[in-house]
Image (cartoon, coloured by chain):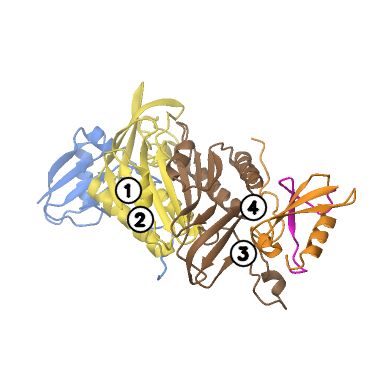
Chain colours: A blue, B yellow, C brown, D orange
């Protein structure tokens, strides 16, 4: 199966491209794809830095299984340290 | 009104969009490009967005305001592309019956935009450019882990 | 810019007056006349000011912002006279290099205006009128001291 | 000596006038004037309610000695209970 990978901002400049196409085995996870991408673009981020990703415009965890045709975006830091958290409050019922 | 635009933003219709006769308070935030950042003169800025995702994340923030404060009247317009000094990069307007909620919710929206929305800012100086928040040119070594690639608000120099 | 006016307020020049290339954040508050107050439909409002004193008190609030946050860019325009529903009674704009101070200082100014500035509001209903904050028609008696003539923000229905 | 008294908002309506002229003995205080005014306009405010006043556009205490020609304004409640307080913070030195 094939997925599209999109690079933005710092990652786009470091990868030297705005998008790439990757062929994966069925059942491959987002984490596996990100490792593959980092292998192809070793300068993308320092080894200890987690690369945050979105699948089809939603933030996703490394364990998510990808589907053929998915669009994966690598999200350089926007703020605050790693993956964006949930809202900083408990929702009310109204 | 939730928009990402490449045009100059006129704040007036953004504010107007949240006004209703039950709202006694309207708070509007403008994020503006500053002339100096990190002690250096900024030539211009480039904002880049992953637009469909950014729009979804902005809409989520609007819903968060609904669940926290029960307010529906939230408008967000973010500009992308090249911005000059003193250009407005972001307008957030929140209206509510009473003023405290409008201030709280507007500040929340701005904070949250800088946490979750995939919009990035590059500051261009005489002697180079930097994606704000990505100190990728800092030396590695002891303590570098916390600094290198450390995420910082995308709009740090424009209203952080 | 610190003004009291009998004309409709255009917020745009108020906001513009605090913008400078060192300010990355501009927060603007609009106080707007709501259609309902105390559960009743408001016909219109009358604002009355002791104008020379009100201008002095507004200037003091501007200086308080200077001493607390070191910010100089504060603009306040308050309308007086007869206001219709959805008219803007108050515009406060505060700009600062970073956003937190702009939000804090703007909210402070609005709170403080309602504490010290001699501007009063009369809400006119179908069946009468009331100076907001002056519950002079409440019965005297036990506990009345705290309610009767108890001061309440002058602009309670417009952005409290 | 003579002073002008100005009435605003609720006090203006209760007094039925926007201003009045009062003749005082030399050395009279603001507090004495306010008592005189309340005597002339008994409906101005309930007996237990303190009437806040300004002299020449500054909030003033009851003990202030008035001067000939002073303008005294009676200030109906603006907010929060009685005389406006000082700023709710300690000023910094910058």
Of labels 3 and 4, earlier in sequence is 4
Furthest residue in direction right, as rendered? D26
User: Residue at left 45%, top 55%?
Assistant: C87
Q: Residue B4 in the image: state x and y as whole percent.
A: 28, 45
Residue located beneath label 2 in the image: B61
Question: Distance from label 4 to label 2 (Cα)?
Answer: 39 Å
Question: Distance from label 3 to label 2 (Cα)?
Answer: 36 Å
Is residue C49 rendered to the left or right of residue D15? left
Task: For marks 1 and 3, give the one nearer the viewer.
Answer: 3
As for residue A62 lying within the magenta part, the answer is no
In which chain is the residue bearing label 3? Answer: C
- Which mark is on residue C118? 4
As for residue D53 lying within the magenta part, the answer is yes
Q: Do residues under tags 1 and 2 come within 8 Å of each other at their CB atoms?
A: yes
Q: Do residues under tags 3 and 2 come within 8 Å of each other at their CB atoms?
A: no
User: Residue at left 43%, top 46%?
Assistant: B29
Picture layout, residue B159 above or below residue C157: above
Residue located beneath label 3 in the image: C133
Q: Tell me the crowding category of disc 3: few under 14, some 14 to 19, or many 20 or more residues within 10 angstroms, Cα based.
A: many
Numbered range of the magenta stretch: D45-65
Of labels 1 and 2, earlier in sequence is 2
Q: Residue C28 in the image: state x and y as whole percent.
A: 47, 46
Q: Do residues under tags 1 and 3 come within 8 Å of each other at their CB atoms?
A: no
Identify the secondary structure beneath mark 3: loop
């Amino acid at each position: 199966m094939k997925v599209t990978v999109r690079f933005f901002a710092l990652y786009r400049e470091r990868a030297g491209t705005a998008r790439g196409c990757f062929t994966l085995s069925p059942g491959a996870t987002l984490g596996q794809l990100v490792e593959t991408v980092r292998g192809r673009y070793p300068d993308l981020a320092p080894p200890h830095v987690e690369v945050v990703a979105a699948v089809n415009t939603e933030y996703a965890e490394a364990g998510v299984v990808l589907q053929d045709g998915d669009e994966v975006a690598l999200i350089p830091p926007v703020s605050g340290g790693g993956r964006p958290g949930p809202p900083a409050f408990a929702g009310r019922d109204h | 009104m939730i928009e990402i635009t490449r045009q100059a933003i006129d704040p007036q219709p953004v504010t107007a969009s949240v006004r209703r006769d039950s709202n006694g308070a309207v708070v509007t935030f403008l994020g503006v490009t500053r002339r100096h950042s990190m002690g250096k003169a900024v030539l211009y800025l480039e904002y880049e967005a992953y637009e469909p995702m950014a729009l979804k994340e902005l809409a989520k923030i609007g819903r968060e305001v609904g669940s926290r404060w029960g307010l529906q009247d939230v408008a967000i317009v973010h500009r992308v592309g090249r911005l000059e000094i003193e250009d407005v990069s972001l307008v957030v307007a929140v209206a509510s019956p009473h003023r405290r909620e409008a201030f709280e919710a507007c500040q929340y929206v701005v904070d949250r935009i800088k946490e979750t929305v995939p919009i990035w800012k590059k500051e261009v100086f005489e002697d180079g450019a930097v994606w704000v928040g990505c100190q990728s040119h800092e030396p590695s070594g002891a303590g570098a882990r916390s600094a290198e690639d450390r995420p910082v608000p995308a709009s740090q120099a424009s209203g952080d």
